[in-house]
Amino acid sequence: IKHPLQNMWTLWFFKIENNRTWEDCQMEIASFNTVEDFWALYNHIEPASHLKLGCDYSMFKEGIKPMWEDEHNCKGGRWLINLNKQQRATELDNFWMEVLLLMIGEAFSEHSDEVCGAVVNVRSKGDKIGVWTADVKKGESILKIGHVLKVRLNIPRHVTIGFQAHKDTMVKSGSTAKNRFTV
Ligand code: M7G
């Protein structure tokens, strides 16, 4: 028998296409709820660093769309890890895989329920990884999740990562929204 995960997860792929809304360009790839099926999927797809510019992968708990508008996300926000251009070659795939393993392994202990999913954006100006949580009011959980991310990704102590509310991100085009929390 396969090793069950606590949650069923869905992998999504985003690629913008002409005459389609942003939401219509989010494609559900596959869902899984065992360790073996996670690796079968992970080993079958391109690493994030090979995606075309402008594409995303998202992995969310089943039933949560990788969008601010989803009822599970709309009151929440994200821990944002900004990578520089060099880090696509050195860190992007490692960070993304580690984030996926932290999520499916429920590594945020009692705060794992606050995690909705994660997104990797491949962008010319610098790639981004976001870990989305459900409720900006759950400060204790958000800080614990941010701390685990920082430690497990081996982000140096002098590098600060910030948490932004989706409500703030939504209305800021171009510049980044203010941080509600930092670690
Ligand atoms: P991005 O892809 O998160 O980052 O957002 P980028 O600016 O580095 O490319 C780009 C644009 O995609 C936003 O300005 C929105 O127009 C759209 N977009 C992104 N997200 C995460 C959402 C979302 O959750 N819902 C909707 N409706 N649009 C989004």
Image (cartoon, helix red, strand yellow):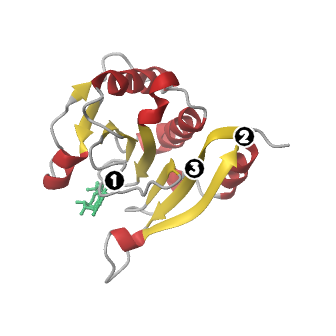
Residue at 44% from the left image edge and 45% from the top image edge: 118
CA distance for labels 2 and 3: 12 Å
Which residue carries the number 1 mark?
71
Describe residue 125's horizontal placement relative to residue 11 as left or right. left
Q: Is residue 116 above or below residue 113?
A: below
Q: Is residue 124 above or below residue 79?
A: below
Does any atom of ligand 1 lie closer than 8 Å to the CB of label 3? Answer: no
- Viewer-closest of 45 and 11: 11
CA distance for labels 1 and 3: 17 Å
Residue at 49% from the left image edge and 56% from the top image edge: 63
Describe residue 45's horizontal placement relative to residue 1 as left or right. left
Q: Is residue 40 visible?
A: yes
Q: Earlier in the sequence, mark 1 or mark 3?
A: 3
Q: What mark, if any, has residue 45 been given in the picture?
A: none
Amino acid beneath label 1 = Glu
Tell me if label 2 and label 3 are in contact, CB under 8 Å. Answer: no
Amino acid beneath label 2 = Pro
- Rendering coords of residue 98 (x, y %): 55, 34
Amino acid beneath label 3 = Trp
Which residue carries the number 3 mark?
9
- Rendering coords of residue 67 (x, y %): 35, 57
CA distance for labels 2 and 1: 26 Å
Does any atom of ligand 1 lie closer than 8 Å to the CB of label 2? Answer: no
- Rendering coords of residue 155 (x, y %): 41, 24
Q: Earlier in the sequence, mark 2 or mark 3?
A: 2
Q: Nearer the viewer, mark 2 or mark 1?
A: 1
Q: Residue furthest bottom?
A: 19
The image quadrant where one finds ligand 1 is bottom left
Which residue carries the number 2 mark?
4
Describe residue 101's horizontal placement relative to residue 69 as left or right. right
